Amino acid sequence: MGVNLSALVTPQNRTLPDFSGKAIAIDAFNTLYQFLAIIRQPDGTPLMDSQGRVTSHLSGIIYRLTGFMEAGIRPVLVFDGRPPPRKARTVAARGEVKQRAEREWQRALEEGDIPKARTKAMQTSRLTGEMVQQARDLLEALGIPVVSAPSEGEAEAAFLAANGTVFAAGSQDYDSLLFGAPILVKNLALTGRRKLPNKMVFIDVQPEEIHLADVLAGLAVTREQLVDMALLMGTDFNEGVQGIGPKKSLALIRKHGSLAPALASLNVTIEGADEVRGIFLEPDVRPAEVQWRPPSREKVLDILVTQHQFSEPRVESALKKLGDVPPESQTSLDKWF
C-alpha cells in the first residue's frame, strides 16, 4: 500500500484532458490490482470467461486505459521485476489479509449481505503470473509501450519521469515521491463515479497532480528527510515506530534533522534503516526507450473475443477510441511535453 502522506500533501485537482499529449509511466501492478479490486459483480465475484479465468484486469485495460487514451494521454506500463528481499514481510502480511478477507467475503454471502460481500471481495485480489502475461500481451497488441523494471515498477516509473522520458509517474501510492518522481498523477485508473467503502455514498473521483518540489517546500524538508519520515511511519520494506504517523514524523525530522537522532530521541531502532533508505534514494532502475505503435485489431480481438469471450462490438467500440497514435518510427518524445 505504500506510505500514506495524504494528511501532509495537497494535490492539484485535474481532469483527464489536462494530460492530453502527455506521456505518463504507470505502475502496472498497482493499476492491475485496482482493476481486479473494482471491476466485479455486485456480490464481489470478479469478471470471468467461460473457462472460469478472471478477466477483470483485461476489462480494465481495454475499457479504462483506452478511455484516457481517448483524452490524448499516452501511457507507458511499467511492470515490477524482482522485489527487494526486504519486501518479503509486506508480501506475507498482504497474503494474510487476503485470506482473512476471503473468509469474511464468504460469510457475508452466506448472510446475504451483498454490499459487505463486495467490499470484502475487493480485498482478495490476486495477480498471478498468468494474469501478468495476459496483460502484457494485450498492452502490446494495443501498441502501448511496456517496460520491465529491474526491481520495483514504481521506482522505474519515477526514474523515467525524473530523466524526462515521460511527463509524470502514475500510481495510487505516494512512494513515487520517495523514489524521486518530480510529478505524481493519482486516480488515472479510478476516474469516475465511485462508491465509498461501507457507505451508500458515491463520489466523483478525478485525477490529482502532485509535484515533489511543492511537497518538499510545503513541508520544509528535503527528499532525504521525506524518506526518513517514511521510515518512521513504516514502509513496504520496514516496520515503523509504533504511534508515529505523518504529523509526528514530520515534527521529529524537523526537530532532529535526520533519522538517527530522531530514533535516539525515542530510544528505538529500525532494523536495516540504511538499506531501506538506499531502496528509495538509490533504487535499482535503468533507462528505457518507449514507442507507441498502431494497435493490432486482429490480435486484440483474438485475445479478448476469441480467447476470453468479450463482446466484439464493445471491443471494437473501445478500439475506435484510440484515434491517432505516434508512428512506429517515433523515437522522440518532444511532442508529448
Image (tube, rainbow, N blue to C red):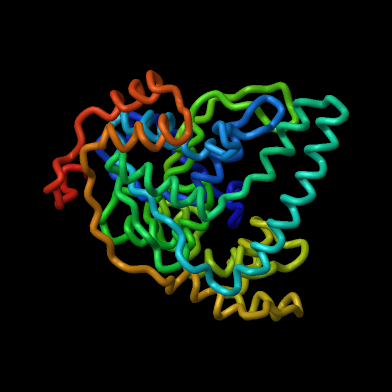
In the rendered image, the vertical position of residue 211 relative to residue 196, given as above or below: below
Vertical arrangement, residue 332 with respect to residue 298, above or below: below
- Residue nearer the viewer, 223 or 238: 238
Q: Position of residue 299 (x, y in %)?
A: 31, 38
Would residue 308 be seen by someone viewing this image from the given angle?
Answer: yes
Q: Nearer the viewer, residue 151 or 281?
A: 151
Quarter of the image for the C terminus: give it: top left
**Camera-side residue: 43 or 288?**
43
Give x and y (percent) for residue 127. 57, 50
Q: Quadrant of residue 254?
A: bottom right
Q: Is residue 128 left or right of residue 197?
A: left
Q: Position of residue 205 (x, y in %)?
A: 52, 29
Task: Please identify the residue farthest to the right as the structure is shown.
Answer: 111
Tell me if residue 233 can be seen.
no
In the rendered picture of this protein, how many numbered marks are placed on residues? 0
Q: Residue at x 50, y 40 (%)?
A: 57
Residue in view at x 34 percent, y 35 percent: 300
Residue drawn at 19 percent across, 31 percent down: 324
Q: Residue at x 46, y 56 (%)?
A: 176
Side (left or right) of 336 relative to 181? left
**Rendering coords of residue 317 (x, y %):** 34, 21
Q: In this rendered view, identify the residue nearer to me: 103 or 12.
A: 103
Residue 297 location, quadrant: top left
